[in-house]
Amino acid sequence: MNSIRVTIWNEFRHEQRDEAVRSIYPDGIHAALAKPLSSAGMQVRSATLDQSEQGLPAALLDETDVLVWWGHVAHDEVEDQTVERVVRRVHAGMGLVVLHSGHFSKVFKRLMGTSCDLRWREEDEKERLFVVDPTHPIAEGLPPYFELPKEETYGEHFDIPTPDEIVFLSWFSGGDVFRSGVTFRRGRGKIFYFRPGHETYPTYHDANIQRVLVNACRWAAPALGPVPTYGHAPSPENAR
Amino acid sequence: MNSIRVTIWNEFRHEQRDEAVRSIYPDGIHAALAKPLSSAGMQVRSATLDQSEQGLPAALLDETDVLVWWGHVAHDEVEDQTVERVVRRVHAGMGLVVLHSGHFSKVFKRLMGTSCDLRWREEDEKERLFVVDPTHPIAEGLPPYFELPKEETYGEHFDIPTPDEIVFLSWFSGGDVFRSGVTFRRGRGKIFYFRPGHETYPTYHDANIQRVLVNACRWAAPALGPVPTYGHAPSPENAR
Amino acid sequence: MNSIRVTIWNEFRHEQRDEAVRSIYPDGIHAALAKPLSSAGMQVRSATLDQSEQGLPAALLDETDVLVWWGHVAHDEVEDQTVERVVRRVHAGMGLVVLHSGHFSKVFKRLMGTSCDLRWREEDEKERLFVVDPTHPIAEGLPPYFELPKEETYGEHFDIPTPDEIVFLSWFSGGDVFRSGVTFRRGRGKIFYFRPGHETYPTYHDANIQRVLVNACRWAAPALGPVPTYGHAPSPENAR
Amino acid sequence: MNSIRVTIWNEFRHEQRDEAVRSIYPDGIHAALAKPLSSAGMQVRSATLDQSEQGLPAALLDETDVLVWWGHVAHDEVEDQTVERVVRRVHAGMGLVVLHSGHFSKVFKRLMGTSCDLRWREEDEKERLFVVDPTHPIAEGLPPYFELPKEETYGEHFDIPTPDEIVFLSWFSGGDVFRSGVTFRRGRGKIFYFRPGHETYPTYHDANIQRVLVNACRWAAPALGPVPTYGHAPSPENAR
């Protein structure tokens, strides 16, 4: 099997403006995300919002098997044509791993067709993630549940379509629950949304979280099923 | 229970231009669709593309429990702001019943997040619809399968997200199958896509089809579940 | 619409042996369950394990639209032929609402095909139930979340098949989450499993819980879809 | 990755009694099923009903990653304890690929909780299988649809629980459709039901069918997710 080609897209703003975030992610969140993926043998590239074509020219997307998305304060700056390039590539088979506040990115909302809204607060609560589908490849190598000592809290209702699969449910010490690891298919592309990862916590340095990232990129890599044809079509009877 | 308020939106172009279509639907497809719904006690209004605000002002949508959508040749003329008004109303709880070539409407594609493409041909094939979920309210009063002697053919692959429920599968004499009755939730709104209804066939005069339309509007009527609140939120512990 | 005929089956052992339980449910858990259903206009009958034919003769099941099941210490006493009578009736269309420790009943395990096991403890924890599908009829009239001040705790992993729908997720103060309101179809029958209801707490006197019970029985009432025929069958082409 | 250990269970009766079947499968259906799996690098063993412990002693099951099941005329001869051994092993993580008339095996019915009944006839009809989930690993390497020139016909309604995933839909020239490739999770085990394979046709010599068998065994191989613990459990808070 060829090595999976992952592009990590990070809006890369918090790290440049906020000392607290920079102290946790001195080379940017994308560098922290890259580390476990590279260690797992994937070919990893990074892309950021302020680069040319917002970091995502068509040529790069065409050579990307899985796109990892981290964005927060700059969702509105992502141009519609960037969104359309990404969405078309997902439809064509590229995997997409959307992280944390990426739930509100234009790309994710466009692929879901809902508001993707939720309840949230930042109060240093404990998060505990339970595996509810132990047969899922994204749960490989994990314990039945694991903890993050402090994270931002997200609470239901999470306004997404019915997920194809629910891999993780989160418990928060402040009294909330959340569907924190969910999958969707759109066209030939597979999508995984994963909740943890607030910029003010060292979440992406956690070994269990890194394991999920590796598993998710493997799972989201393009399938080798048929490429459907669409439009006017003769009867299969006549087609042969 | 109050009477369900249904608005039937029809682009209403074929019937004005094409004698063959007009002979089947002399008062417009919307009039044919209205008949069984009115007979079932629903409050039915019609709206067409060439009316003010494309037939769908906010005030009308606010008073609509279920919107039925028939469009084909004029999908591109539906303005983005019309689409947004409809989508927002679906998210807020309005039901949506999308018919036949409405699979390619901007509204449906926006809510699905996929291309909604499929294979098709017009060769007067027989369509046979099988009920695959006999527990579903949309299948109420129907036989295990029923036929349309001539219809346009749609074939898989149908590029939609995994449906929440599959109520009908269609068999076509030319050799195709199709997921022809499928449901989706988006926000607080319920969506039913129903395949049959090409403008050159008397499909909407068929008793089984009319039964499906009535059942679908009843099923899609707004639920009375909680209205979620979103955004920054205190801990439920503290909230009381 | 005719009144829904509900039969509440209760093993009825705790209430006879344990003063603490009897003080909460002096007439049996079945009496407490019956109250909101009767008030909602349903025809309610009760049945208990020590009655003739374990309370569930075929004639009673044939006249039952929805069977509510509460059992705990006497699961093993339910005879295989009783289980088969109930399962056949569910397949034929009777609704089934399984409560709390009924997750381990022979009937539920037989219909699920899994162990239906889970993690549990009795430590007077707070349970908070979140509605995750606000479009579902079982969530009608409920707030976005509601609480039970003390309940037995159930925790994931809950070993059930992938539910058709998840209506409620529970948060427990001791650190667990649970899929606490889930639906399944089996044959023509609809099944709802609802977690709360430990015998040592006044859970079934809670107004929100009572609302769920009423909604669940309405939802589970037999559908009026087609009765499929099975076995050797001519081609539909020749059948007409 | 270690080689997948596949056990093919065949009741092996038709081939011994019926010259027509033997001429197609001279060494038994199990030998034909083994061929593509061995060629794909799997470790394949065969087991038949008339062997000791009905071919499936616990020691063999413990060393089996994926069990392939072909049975038809002798379903009733499979003893309850054999069924329980297989079911327990599926719950513990063994994959199960159920073929054709295996829909009516005790093992499959026990895992589904439904009758698993369907409509059928033997009239040498053409079957065409359409891929409806091109992202699924079981569809890898297949065309958008493929044909079997003659097969037994199965028709809806197929009385199974809502599948977790639908990979294939079949069209039959006599007028039927069927959900012919469907997945289910039960415990830690993954199950794939695949419709084609009547004993009087050379279906298992077909290259596309062989491709599906290989893909299915790879997909059904045990996941490496957590092994849940069940029963009385302390609070996760206290557990650490």
Image: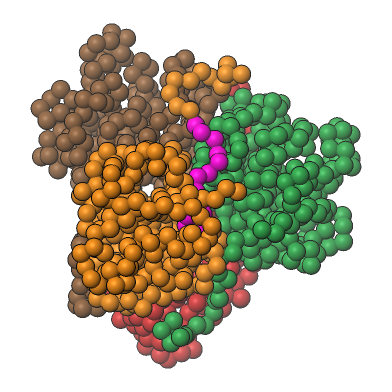
Chain colours: A green, B red, C brown, D orange
Residue extending farthest top = C19
Task: Give me the residue at 53% from left, 60% from top.
Answer: D40
Question: Does the rendering let one see residue D161?
Answer: yes
Q: Position of residue C238 (x, y in %)?
A: 21, 78
Q: Quick check: A45 above or below B38?
A: above
Q: Nearer the viewer, residue B31 or D88?
A: D88
Q: Position of residue D110 (x, y in %)?
A: 30, 44
Please give left or right for residue D76 compared with residue B98 in the image.
left
Q: How many marks?
A: 0
Task: Give me the residue at 66% from left, 26% from top.
Answer: A126
Residue B132 lies in the magenta stretch: no
Please give left or right for residue A160 compared with residue D169 in the image.
right
Residue D215 lies in the magenta stretch: yes
Q: Position of residue C156 (x, y in %)?
A: 49, 31
Q: Which residues are magenta?
A: D214-228
The quarter in which the C terminus of chain C is drawn is bottom left
Please give left or right for residue B237 compared with residue B214 in the image.
right
Task: Give me the residue at 39% from left, 79% from top.
Answer: B175
Occupied quadrant, residue D225: top right
Occupied quadrant, residue A124: top right
